Amino acid sequence: MSALYTASATASGDGRNGEARTSDGQLKLNLATPTEMGGAGDGTNPEQLFAAGYAACFLSALKMIARAEKAPIADAAITADVSLHKQEVGFKLGVELHVEMSGVDQEAAEKLVEAAHQVCPYSNATRGNIDVVLDVTVA
C-alpha cells in the first residue's frame, strides 16, 4: 500500500521528560510528566499529543462524511479525553470523544459520528485495542 503522507517525529530525553520535534520543524515542544503522575507538569505529555491528533483527525473525518451526505452541519468541535490506565502488566489508554455540532438533529448527528468513526484513521488504528466512547451533543 502506498502512503499518502508520512509524518516523522523524534522524542529525546527519558520519554516523558525531554523534547519532541517533527522532522519539518513545525512542532517542537518540551515533554513533561503530568503532576497527577508525580511530575512537574511543565510540558506536554504523550496523552495530550494523542488527544490533539485524534480530535483533529476525527473532526476531519466528520466533515468529510457530512459533505458526502450533504448534511448541513454548521459548527463542529471534537474534544478527545485520553486517559491512561494501569493494568496488571503495563498500561492502557481509554478515549472519550465528545462531539458537538449544530445544523442537524440528534439522530442525524449520531449517524454522522458513527460513520466518521468507521473512516477516521485514529479510530481504525485503535479499534479493538482501546475503548472509545462517543458522546454526541447537538447545539
Image: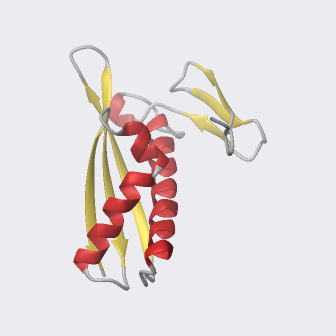
Q: From the image, which quarter does the C terminus lie in?
A: bottom left
Q: Residue furthest top?
A: 89
Q: Horizontally, is 53 left or right of 125 in the view?
A: right
Work out whether 14 lies above or below 97.
above
Q: Which residue is found at the position 64% from the left and 40% from the top?
A: 29
Front residue (pair 80, 48): 80
Q: Quadrant of the N terminus?
A: top right
Locate residue 7, reporting x and y percent: 67, 39
Q: For the view shown, which residue lies furthest in the right direction? A: 24
Count of labels in the image: 0
Using residue 25 as the reference point, say whether residue 90 is left or right of it: left
In front here: 75 or 13? 75
Quadrant of the rendered image containing residue 99: bottom left
Q: What's the colour scheme?
A: secondary structure
Q: Is residue 68 above or below residue 23?
A: below
Give the image location of residue 94, x and y in percent. Answer: 29, 39
* Residue drawn at point x = 31 percent, y = 17 percent: 90
Query: Residue 52 at what x, y percent from top left?
Result: 49, 51
Left or right of 12, for residue 48: left
Q: Residue at x 36, y 82 (%)?
A: 102
* Relative image position of residue 68 (x, y in whole percent): 49, 73
What residue do we see at 40% from left, 60% from top? 116
- Viewer-proximal residue, 80 or 73? 73
Q: Nearer the viewer, residue 34 or 61?
A: 61
